Each structure stands twice: as C-alpha cells, then as structure tokens.
Image (spheres, helix red, strand yellow):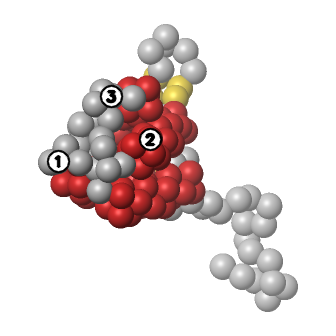
Amino acid sequence: MLWPSGSSDNAGSPGPQQSESVQQTQNGDGGTPAATTSGPGLTEQAGKVDALLTEMVATRSELGTVTGDGECESSGLRRIRTQRQDQLEKARALEVSALESGTEMKDALVRALEASVESNKRYLDMAPDCPSTATDADSRASQAKSEFVRYWTPIAEQAGLQTRSADTI
C-alpha cells in the first residue's frame, strides 16, 4: 500500500522477490539446510530442457535413417550437423538455476552435444562411407549423455516431464 508521501508502510522491508517457493531440507550430513526449488522457475526451465531433448531425439532418429544403409549421404549428414550445432547453442544458453544440480546437468548436455557435433564431422569427412567403428567422439557423447540422464531423471519426474535414456537423445 502506498501512503500519500509515496512510501509504503513496509518501507525498508523487502517484498516477495520470486514467485518460486524454496523449501528447506536437511542435507545428508544433518548440518545446514539445503534449498530445494520448485514452482514456475523449475517448470519453465525444465520445459525448455525437455523441448531441446525432443529436438535431439528427432535428430538422432534422422541420423539413423541417413546412415542406416551403411552409406553416409553427405547432404543428410550436413543437415544433421547443422541441427546438432543449433542444439549445442541452445544448450549453452539454457537457464538452469531453478533445477537441482542444473549447472552439472547443463555441463553434461553441452559436452554430449559438443562430442556429437565432432562425431558428425567425422562422419562427413568419411562420406559417402560410414566409419566402421565408433569414434572417440561417439564414446564421449555416450558417456556425457549417460551422465546427463542421471541428473535429468529426477528433475523430469519432479516437473512431470518425460524421462529420457542416453541411447535416445
């Protein structure tokens, strides 16, 4: 409420700063409380991660189609590389402050996409042939995706979103 002087009757005391709720829970050692965030920030941020994952699933499916017959068609591989590069930029721009272990989750996702872009480059370098064995970049992408999924699963469950597996993103 504003008084005629333009000040509020609570001058000096901060009002609500966020529409999110922060619950205090004891951390595992029984010491200081650890904050657990829920609310609109979690829902919005998790939704943006989920939308990116949906794009990644589609790109992975398209990669399977492009390489499925044992030949790596260059135009399809270029399209996939471009999609992966776009996804990498989106991953780097994600806001994850409302997500538990959000920074670590985002880091794993970025590393997975960086390795995927590198792998796509290798496929392009060999086109129209496909690499006969998994590359180091493929292995790094798989490891980072597995790490990401460990962070993502509890967040997705909390936000009511689809959980994912490393072999589908």
Disc 2 secondary structure class: helix
Q: Residue at x 15, y 48 (%)?
A: 69
Q: How far across and down, in percent of the image, does residue 136 sit?
A: 43, 26
**Amino acid type, label 1:** Gly
User: Residue 165: x percent and y percent?
Assistant: 23, 37
Closer to the camera in the image, 53 or 4: 53
Q: CA distance from mark 1 to mark 3?
A: 15 Å
Q: Nearer the viewer, residue 3 or 64?
A: 64
Q: Residue at x 41, y 49 (%)?
A: 124
Question: Does residue 147 show up?
Answer: no
Q: Secondary structure at mark 3?
A: loop
Which residue is the extreme one toward the right? 5
In which quarter of the view is residue 131 placed? top left
Q: Name the disc covering residue 134, or none.
A: 3
Residue 9 shows in the view: yes
Residue 122: which numbered mark, if any? 2
Identify the residue at horizontal 55%, vertical 47% (top origin): 97
Q: How many marks?
A: 3
Q: Earlier in the sequence, mark 1 or mark 3?
A: 1
**Quarter of the rendering containing residue 48:** bottom left
Picture quarter containing residue 87?
bottom left
Give the Cα separation between the discs numbered 2 and 3: 10 Å
Q: Which mark is residue 165?
A: none
Pinpoint residue 137: horizontal percent, then vertical percent.
44, 32
- Residue, disc 1: 68
